[in-house]
Amino acid sequence: MDKETRNRIERATQAARGLLEQDFADQLEGVFDIRLDGTLAAEPGSHLDAPQRVLWRKLMAAVEHHRASGQRASEAVATYLREAAFTMLNRFVALKMLEARGLVQECVSRGEQSAGFKEFCGLAPGLVQLPDRGYRLYIESLFDELSTEVKVLFDRRDRSSVLWPKRATFERLLEILNAADLSSGEESSVIGRQSSAGDSGLTTEDRRPKTIWDQDETIGWVYQFFNGQDERRKMREESQAPRNSRELAVRNQFFTPRYVVQFLTDNTLGRIWYEMRGTKTVLADQCEYMVRKPGESFAPRAKKDPRDLRVLDPACGSGHFLLYAFDLLLVIYEEAWADPESPKSEATGRTLAEDYPSLDGLRRAVPGLVLAHNLYGVDIDPRCAQIAQLALWMRAQKAYRDFGIGRAERPQIRRSNIVVAEPLVADEQIAKEFVAKLDDPELGRLFMSLVESLSLAGDLGLLLRVEHLVAHPAKRGQTADLFAPPEDQIRAALDRFTREAARTGSTRRRLFADDATHGMALLGVAETRFDVVLMNPPFGAGSARAKQAFETAYPRTKNDVYAAFVERAIELLSAGGRIGAITSRTGFFLSSFQRWREEVLLQTAPPVVFADLGAGVLDSAMVETAAYCLEKSN
């Protein structure tokens, strides 16, 4: 994507953010008595009708949830305002991208004249009596349908979903996203299916102009440009080190170029499969950046069922590495399926061919298998969960389309492993209720220990070694065959607690359960061992709030966050696993990184591929970079 196109995306993103934040601020102050200075009404105002009182309670619960994490009242309101704006913007950007891929009918590109809305009105003529002719109801019905598979972005029960833009704001938002300068380009062709119930409504041959909305990169640039350069500059002027988790995230949002993604993935995941197959793989040609020496020899790797290959990006952003890894995994699955010597899976105890006797059966399953078993992402920014999950879901739909599987025949994508690392905000009263329901004092103490340890999750992410907190049954004096591991017991209890919260309509309970679920998901990733870790981690100083904990945990690599990410990534690898990273190049020659080079890299995971890239690689980042791959010693 060229610079001018990126500039257009940046202008549109910043305009949309300003528009939504102003509208939502006006609503918070003018309707719900929630002031930007942190002044909060003790009770809903008498001017609010019954539905608005319900919304007031939800808004107050969300703001109080942020305050419980240690934010001042004004900060909590600002955080909520920002979350509401980016969630709304991400949803409409998503609809534009889904339209471009034929995954929904035209719904926002022509506003109320969109074909999908006209069809919706034809099914319910009474909608014309509503103030907006039912357009909001139509859009929300799309959100509900999409939330069955992309829940983290489209779930309208989410705390950031309470507000809806006023009509003038809504119309202006659509104008920004539908602007001609975002829709220019050459003509492209997309093969679809005839419109039918439950289908996307594409014609057999849908010819339309190619736009930025067709490009996978677009959602990543929207993610980066939501925070403007002026905002980053102000942060750096006010403090040399990030003061909190949000500043750490904003300062390190730099899009990884496609060629770097390919270089690192080809020489990790691609190379591992190449060695497992004894060089006999399509990836030998498909991975154009895979480094191979003339006449090289290597010990072939033991084969694995593809479902047992695990790839992690511990600072995943919009999921750029995971998207390319998805493409390679599609090839890997088909080659393993056709291989009579392919081993049985740890997950099922059977080979792929035994589980899927036909190639068609495998192709119906494989997009969901890749998201459920292979790809993991963690980030401290909640927008990443929204965007990365959407991007992976769209990639799965593209795979179905390429396999010739129509929308009506595609299995639903029920699982992905994208995790937000954030504090588990323990509302004291709700936490006590939950611990009481565990009916196990030791399990309760374990849970509260996890709560305490996760207080820095938003600052440290996966650098937090949360897996060390959990004692397994044998360590608790139990028999592993008779009792589930404690984390599984806590997860089951959270599921019950969440269902109960849904029945009672308790926003506070649901927010607590959501946070606890994120915490358990982070624990699950930390306990997993991976074949590949791919990353463009943060660099420079860590969050000031976590400085002491960070330096204590990483004495050898505390001088730069990226060095600690490499150290942690090695811990998370299986023996023989590979890391692919793009970082500052300083670690390879500055004396302050000597322990990192000697004790971390050379002793545990020596470099196998190295590219000194220099400056100008990470967009506006003022850093000289290197891209390299490490292999963990056996």
Image (spheres, grey):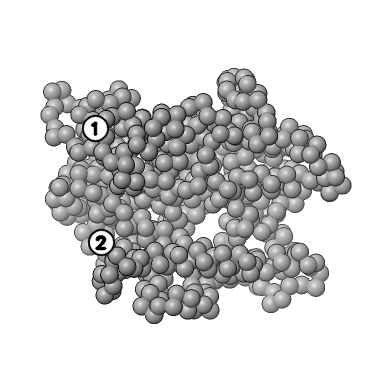
Residue 469, quarter of the rendered image: bottom left
Judge whether 238 appears above or below 530 on screen: below
Q: Could you say which is closer to the camera, residue 141 or residue 112?
A: 141
- Element carrying mark 1: loop
Mark 2 crowdedness (10 Å alpha carbons): few <14, some 14-19, many ≥20: some
Which kind of residue does numbered mark 1 sit on? Glu
Cα distance in 3D space between marks 1 and 2: 43 Å
Residue occupying image coordinates x 40% and y 72%: 447
Q: Reply above or below: 265 against 139.
A: above
Which residue is at a point 53% across and 42% down the rendered structure image? 412
Label 2: which secondary element: loop
In the rendered image, which residue does mark 1 sit on?
341
Q: Position of residue 443 (x, y in %)?
A: 38, 74
In the current view of this chain or complex, which residue is farthest to the right? Answer: 129
Image position, residue 217 (x, y; %)? 49, 35
Q: Position of residue 64 (x, y in %)?
A: 58, 71
Question: Relative to 233, does residue 364 appear above or below in the rendering?
Answer: above
The mark that comes first in sequence, 1 or 2, is 1
What is the three-letter code of the residue carrying label 2? Tyr
Residue 217 in view of the camera: no
- The answer to whether 188 appears left or right of 255 in the picture is right
- Give 594 or 136, whichever is nearer the viewer: 136
Residue 133 point in image, percent of width and height: 82, 44
Q: Is 499 placed left or right of 361 in the picture? A: right
Q: Nearer the viewer, residue 453 or 411?
A: 411
Judging by the rendered image, the residue that carries numbered circle 2 is: 554
Q: How many marks?
A: 2
Disc number lying in front (1 or 2) = 1
Q: Quadrant of residue 340?
A: top left
The residue that appears at 34% across and 46% down in the rendered structure is 348
